[in-house]
Image (cartoon, rainbow, N blue to C red):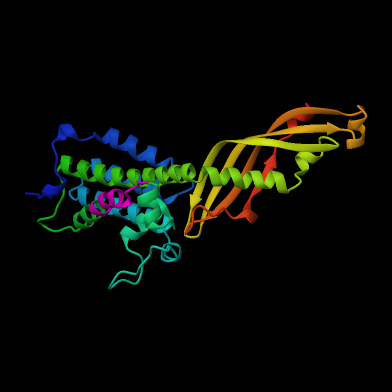
Amino acid sequence: MSKQDPSVGAECGSLPSWPELRKQAFAFLREFPDDGFMPRVLEGALHVGESNNAIRGNLCALALREITGHLLHTWAPDTRVSNCCWYNQEANTERPTRQQRATYIVQGGLPVAFVTDTLQLDHDAVCRPLIKAMDRLNKATHVREKTLLTDDAAIRALVDAALNSLIDLFKAARDCQQEVHRQLAGEIHDAVLDTFLGETLQELDELSTHTLFDYHQTEDIQVMSIDDELIHLKVSGTVYVDLQYGSNSDMRNDMGAVISDSYPYTARLQSKARSPGDILKDTVDVSVDNSSFFE
Protein backbone atom coordinates (compact mmCIF):
# COMPACT_ATOMS: atom_id res chain seq x y z
CA MET A 1 0.00 0.00 0.00
CA SER A 2 1.35 3.43 -0.90
CA LYS A 3 2.01 5.94 1.84
CA GLN A 4 1.53 9.66 1.92
CA ASP A 5 2.88 12.46 4.07
CA PRO A 6 0.00 13.54 6.34
CA SER A 7 1.35 17.09 6.34
CA VAL A 8 0.33 17.46 2.72
CA GLY A 9 -2.97 15.62 2.89
CA ALA A 10 -6.27 17.49 2.69
CA GLU A 11 -9.91 16.92 1.95
CA CYS A 12 -10.46 16.73 -1.80
CA GLY A 13 -13.25 19.23 -1.64
CA SER A 14 -10.99 21.91 -0.17
CA LEU A 15 -8.35 21.62 -2.87
CA PRO A 16 -8.27 23.03 -6.41
CA SER A 17 -8.85 20.53 -9.20
CA TRP A 18 -6.13 19.72 -11.72
CA PRO A 19 -7.62 22.11 -14.33
CA GLU A 20 -7.69 24.83 -11.67
CA LEU A 21 -4.09 24.11 -10.70
CA ARG A 22 -3.08 24.23 -14.37
CA LYS A 23 -4.82 27.57 -14.81
CA GLN A 24 -3.13 28.91 -11.69
CA ALA A 25 0.27 27.64 -12.81
CA PHE A 26 0.22 29.21 -16.24
CA ALA A 27 -1.13 32.49 -14.93
CA PHE A 28 1.98 32.54 -12.77
CA LEU A 29 4.20 31.71 -15.74
CA ARG A 30 2.96 34.79 -17.58
CA GLU A 31 5.02 36.80 -15.07
CA PHE A 32 8.16 35.31 -16.65
CA PRO A 33 7.66 35.49 -20.43
CA ASP A 34 11.37 35.20 -21.23
CA ASP A 35 12.01 32.08 -19.17
CA GLY A 36 12.13 29.05 -21.42
CA PHE A 37 12.87 26.50 -18.69
CA MET A 38 9.91 26.80 -16.35
CA PRO A 39 7.04 26.22 -18.84
CA ARG A 40 8.46 22.89 -19.98
CA VAL A 41 9.20 21.62 -16.49
CA LEU A 42 5.91 22.84 -15.05
CA GLU A 43 3.98 21.19 -17.88
CA GLY A 44 5.86 17.99 -17.13
CA ALA A 45 5.06 18.29 -13.41
CA LEU A 46 1.34 18.74 -14.06
CA HIS A 47 1.25 16.02 -16.70
CA VAL A 48 2.85 13.38 -14.49
CA GLY A 49 0.86 14.55 -11.46
CA GLU A 50 -2.39 13.78 -13.27
CA SER A 51 -1.16 10.49 -14.72
CA ASN A 52 -1.38 6.90 -13.49
CA ASN A 53 2.38 6.66 -13.05
CA ALA A 54 3.22 4.62 -9.95
CA ILE A 55 5.55 7.35 -8.67
CA ARG A 56 3.66 10.31 -10.09
CA GLY A 57 3.61 12.31 -6.86
CA ASN A 58 7.32 11.89 -6.32
CA LEU A 59 8.15 12.92 -9.89
CA CYS A 60 5.80 15.89 -9.65
CA ALA A 61 7.50 16.99 -6.43
CA LEU A 62 10.91 16.66 -8.07
CA ALA A 63 9.89 18.90 -10.97
CA LEU A 64 8.36 21.51 -8.67
CA ARG A 65 11.48 21.53 -6.51
CA GLU A 66 13.64 22.21 -9.56
CA ILE A 67 11.35 25.02 -10.68
CA THR A 68 11.52 26.62 -7.24
CA GLY A 69 15.30 26.27 -7.10
CA HIS A 70 15.59 27.70 -10.60
CA LEU A 71 13.56 30.76 -9.60
CA LEU A 72 15.51 31.34 -6.40
CA HIS A 73 18.89 31.14 -8.14
CA THR A 74 17.81 33.14 -11.21
CA TRP A 75 16.20 36.00 -9.30
CA ALA A 76 18.61 35.94 -6.38
CA PRO A 77 22.11 35.11 -7.67
CA ASP A 78 24.90 34.55 -5.16
CA THR A 79 26.82 37.76 -5.86
CA ARG A 80 23.72 39.96 -5.53
CA VAL A 81 22.50 38.39 -2.31
CA SER A 82 25.89 38.38 -0.62
CA ASN A 83 26.38 42.06 -1.44
CA CYS A 84 23.24 43.14 0.47
CA CYS A 85 23.72 45.13 3.68
CA TRP A 86 21.59 42.63 5.61
CA TYR A 87 23.49 39.54 4.44
CA ASN A 88 25.40 37.37 6.89
CA GLN A 89 26.83 34.05 5.83
CA GLU A 90 25.17 31.29 7.80
CA ALA A 91 27.29 28.77 9.67
CA ASN A 92 28.30 25.68 7.69
CA THR A 93 27.28 27.25 4.38
CA GLU A 94 29.27 28.56 1.44
CA ARG A 95 26.40 30.20 -0.45
CA PRO A 96 23.23 32.13 0.42
CA THR A 97 20.45 30.07 1.93
CA ARG A 98 17.01 29.63 0.44
CA GLN A 99 15.65 31.99 3.09
CA GLN A 100 18.17 34.66 2.11
CA ARG A 101 17.43 34.23 -1.59
CA ALA A 102 13.70 34.58 -0.92
CA THR A 103 14.38 37.69 1.17
CA TYR A 104 16.38 39.20 -1.70
CA ILE A 105 13.56 38.58 -4.18
CA VAL A 106 11.16 40.45 -1.89
CA GLN A 107 13.30 43.42 -0.84
CA GLY A 108 16.61 43.39 -2.70
CA GLY A 109 19.26 45.28 -0.79
CA LEU A 110 16.85 47.35 1.30
CA PRO A 111 17.79 47.38 4.99
CA VAL A 112 15.63 45.12 7.15
CA ALA A 113 14.78 48.01 9.49
CA PHE A 114 13.49 50.08 6.55
CA VAL A 115 11.32 47.21 5.33
CA THR A 116 9.86 46.32 8.73
CA ASP A 117 9.66 49.74 10.42
CA THR A 118 9.08 52.14 7.52
CA LEU A 119 7.31 49.98 4.96
CA GLN A 120 5.56 47.91 7.65
CA LEU A 121 6.16 44.66 5.74
CA ASP A 122 6.95 41.28 7.28
CA HIS A 123 9.14 39.49 4.74
CA ASP A 124 9.64 36.52 7.09
CA ALA A 125 5.92 35.80 7.00
CA VAL A 126 6.15 35.52 3.22
CA CYS A 127 9.34 33.50 3.12
CA ARG A 128 8.35 30.89 5.71
CA PRO A 129 5.64 29.17 3.59
CA LEU A 130 8.07 28.90 0.68
CA ILE A 131 10.75 27.28 2.81
CA LYS A 132 8.14 24.93 4.30
CA ALA A 133 6.92 24.01 0.80
CA MET A 134 10.50 23.38 -0.32
CA ASP A 135 11.05 21.06 2.65
CA ARG A 136 7.94 19.11 1.70
CA LEU A 137 9.04 18.88 -1.92
CA ASN A 138 12.48 17.67 -0.90
CA LYS A 139 10.95 14.99 1.31
CA ALA A 140 8.54 13.86 -1.40
CA THR A 141 11.24 13.41 -4.05
CA HIS A 142 12.65 10.36 -2.27
CA VAL A 143 11.27 7.19 -3.81
CA ARG A 144 11.17 4.58 -1.06
CA GLU A 145 8.68 1.89 -0.18
CA LYS A 146 7.20 4.05 2.52
CA THR A 147 7.38 7.36 0.67
CA LEU A 148 5.50 6.62 -2.55
CA LEU A 149 3.10 9.49 -3.12
CA THR A 150 0.10 8.36 -5.15
CA ASP A 151 -2.89 9.83 -3.33
CA ASP A 152 -4.45 12.40 -5.62
CA ALA A 153 -5.50 14.78 -2.84
CA ALA A 154 -2.02 14.72 -1.31
CA ILE A 155 -0.40 15.43 -4.67
CA ARG A 156 -2.74 18.31 -5.41
CA ALA A 157 -2.09 19.70 -1.93
CA LEU A 158 1.64 19.58 -2.61
CA VAL A 159 1.26 21.36 -5.95
CA ASP A 160 -1.12 23.93 -4.49
CA ALA A 161 1.22 24.76 -1.59
CA ALA A 162 4.26 25.09 -3.86
CA LEU A 163 2.50 27.33 -6.38
CA ASN A 164 0.90 29.51 -3.72
CA SER A 165 4.21 30.04 -1.93
CA LEU A 166 5.86 31.18 -5.17
CA ILE A 167 2.94 33.41 -6.14
CA ASP A 168 2.91 34.99 -2.68
CA LEU A 169 6.67 35.56 -2.83
CA PHE A 170 6.50 37.61 -6.01
CA LYS A 171 3.34 39.38 -4.87
CA ALA A 172 5.26 40.43 -1.76
CA ALA A 173 8.02 41.78 -4.00
CA ARG A 174 5.47 43.92 -5.86
CA ASP A 175 3.94 45.10 -2.58
CA CYS A 176 7.39 46.09 -1.37
CA GLN A 177 8.04 48.06 -4.55
CA GLN A 178 4.71 49.88 -4.22
CA GLU A 179 5.44 50.85 -0.64
CA VAL A 180 8.91 52.06 -1.60
CA HIS A 181 7.60 54.46 -4.22
CA ARG A 182 5.01 55.78 -1.77
CA GLN A 183 7.72 56.47 0.78
CA LEU A 184 10.00 58.12 -1.77
CA ALA A 185 7.34 60.16 -3.61
CA GLY A 186 8.48 63.46 -2.10
CA GLU A 187 12.17 62.86 -2.80
CA ILE A 188 11.38 61.77 -6.36
CA HIS A 189 9.26 64.88 -7.00
CA ASP A 190 12.05 67.13 -5.72
CA ALA A 191 14.73 65.36 -7.76
CA VAL A 192 12.73 65.86 -10.97
CA LEU A 193 12.04 69.48 -9.97
CA ASP A 194 15.75 70.13 -9.54
CA THR A 195 16.34 68.80 -13.04
CA PHE A 196 13.73 71.08 -14.57
CA LEU A 197 15.17 74.06 -12.69
CA GLY A 198 18.83 73.28 -13.22
CA GLU A 199 19.05 71.89 -16.73
CA THR A 200 18.10 73.11 -20.19
CA LEU A 201 15.97 70.43 -21.79
CA GLN A 202 16.15 70.46 -25.58
CA GLU A 203 12.52 69.36 -25.99
CA LEU A 204 11.36 72.49 -24.15
CA ASP A 205 14.03 74.93 -25.20
CA GLU A 206 13.27 74.51 -28.92
CA LEU A 207 9.65 75.56 -28.51
CA SER A 208 10.13 79.30 -27.99
CA THR A 209 12.59 82.13 -27.61
CA HIS A 210 12.57 81.53 -23.87
CA THR A 211 10.81 78.56 -22.31
CA LEU A 212 10.14 79.23 -18.65
CA PHE A 213 9.46 76.36 -16.27
CA ASP A 214 6.38 76.87 -14.11
CA TYR A 215 5.80 73.62 -12.19
CA HIS A 216 5.41 69.89 -12.66
CA GLN A 217 3.15 67.12 -11.40
CA THR A 218 4.21 63.51 -10.88
CA GLU A 219 1.34 61.27 -11.90
CA ASP A 220 2.77 57.78 -11.79
CA ILE A 221 5.81 56.35 -10.04
CA GLN A 222 7.04 52.84 -10.66
CA VAL A 223 9.80 50.91 -8.97
CA MET A 224 11.16 48.97 -11.93
CA SER A 225 13.47 46.83 -9.80
CA ILE A 226 15.42 46.73 -6.56
CA ASP A 227 18.79 45.01 -6.61
CA ASP A 228 21.59 44.78 -4.09
CA GLU A 229 22.81 48.34 -4.77
CA LEU A 230 20.09 50.42 -6.39
CA ILE A 231 16.39 51.14 -6.57
CA HIS A 232 15.51 51.75 -10.23
CA LEU A 233 12.60 54.18 -10.63
CA LYS A 234 10.48 55.41 -13.50
CA VAL A 235 8.24 58.49 -13.26
CA SER A 236 5.64 59.94 -15.58
CA GLY A 237 3.97 63.30 -15.18
CA THR A 238 3.20 66.67 -16.69
CA VAL A 239 5.40 69.75 -16.90
CA TYR A 240 3.80 73.20 -17.14
CA VAL A 241 5.71 75.97 -18.92
CA ASP A 242 5.39 79.49 -20.27
CA LEU A 243 6.50 79.86 -23.90
CA GLN A 244 7.89 83.34 -24.43
CA TYR A 245 8.17 84.60 -28.00
CA GLY A 246 10.44 87.59 -28.38
CA SER A 247 13.21 88.94 -26.21
CA ASN A 248 12.73 90.44 -22.78
CA SER A 249 13.10 93.83 -24.46
CA ASP A 250 10.34 92.91 -26.89
CA MET A 251 8.14 91.96 -23.98
CA ARG A 252 8.69 95.31 -22.30
CA ASN A 253 7.71 97.04 -25.53
CA ASP A 254 4.59 94.91 -26.02
CA MET A 255 6.12 93.24 -29.06
CA GLY A 256 6.28 89.70 -27.69
CA ALA A 257 3.88 87.11 -26.40
CA VAL A 258 3.71 84.45 -23.69
CA ILE A 259 1.65 81.29 -24.05
CA SER A 260 1.17 78.77 -21.24
CA ASP A 261 1.28 75.11 -22.19
CA SER A 262 1.91 71.67 -20.72
CA TYR A 263 3.58 68.47 -21.90
CA PRO A 264 3.90 64.92 -20.63
CA TYR A 265 7.29 63.77 -19.42
CA THR A 266 8.99 60.61 -18.23
CA ALA A 267 11.97 60.40 -15.96
CA ARG A 268 14.28 57.62 -14.89
CA LEU A 269 16.28 57.87 -11.72
CA GLN A 270 17.96 55.74 -9.09
CA SER A 271 18.36 55.64 -5.35
CA LYS A 272 20.73 53.70 -3.15
CA ALA A 273 19.17 50.56 -1.73
CA ARG A 274 21.08 50.96 1.53
CA SER A 275 19.72 54.48 2.01
CA PRO A 276 16.48 54.61 0.00
CA GLY A 277 15.78 58.32 0.52
CA ASP A 278 19.00 59.42 -1.18
CA ILE A 279 18.11 59.97 -4.84
CA LEU A 280 21.26 59.94 -6.95
CA LYS A 281 21.12 63.33 -8.67
CA ASP A 282 23.39 62.32 -11.53
CA THR A 283 21.03 59.50 -12.52
CA VAL A 284 17.97 61.69 -13.10
CA ASP A 285 17.13 61.55 -16.81
CA VAL A 286 14.05 63.53 -17.88
CA SER A 287 12.50 63.28 -21.33
CA VAL A 288 9.65 65.58 -22.43
CA ASP A 289 7.20 64.65 -25.19
CA ASN A 290 6.62 67.87 -27.13
CA SER A 291 4.94 66.23 -30.15
CA SER A 292 1.59 67.92 -29.41
CA PHE A 293 3.23 71.30 -30.06
CA PHE A 294 3.87 70.40 -33.69
CA GLU A 295 0.48 68.86 -34.45
Which residue: 60% across, 38% down?
236
In the drawing, does residue 51 fall left or right of residue 263?
A: left
Residue 213 is inside the magenta segment: no
Give the x, y percent position of residue 159.
Answer: 25, 44
Which residue: 32% across, 37% down?
22
Which secondary structure type mostly characterizes the magenta part of the structure? helix
Does the image show residue 70? no
Which region is colored magenta?
A: 120-132
170 and 280: which is toward the camera: 280
Give the x, y percent position of residue 96.
Answer: 35, 65
Give the x, y percent position of residue 144.
Answer: 14, 59
Give the x, y percent position of residue 135.
Answer: 22, 56
Residue 121 is inside the magenta segment: yes
Which residue: 34% across, 69% down?
89
In the drawing, does residue 55 fall left or right of residue 179?
A: left
Instruction: State the image quarter where residue 261 is shown.
Output: top right
Instruction: State the image quarter where residue 85 is shown.
Output: bottom left
Which residue: 52% across, 42% down?
222
In the rendered image, the quadrant that contains the C terminus is top right
Query: How many callouts does the rendering have?
Result: 0
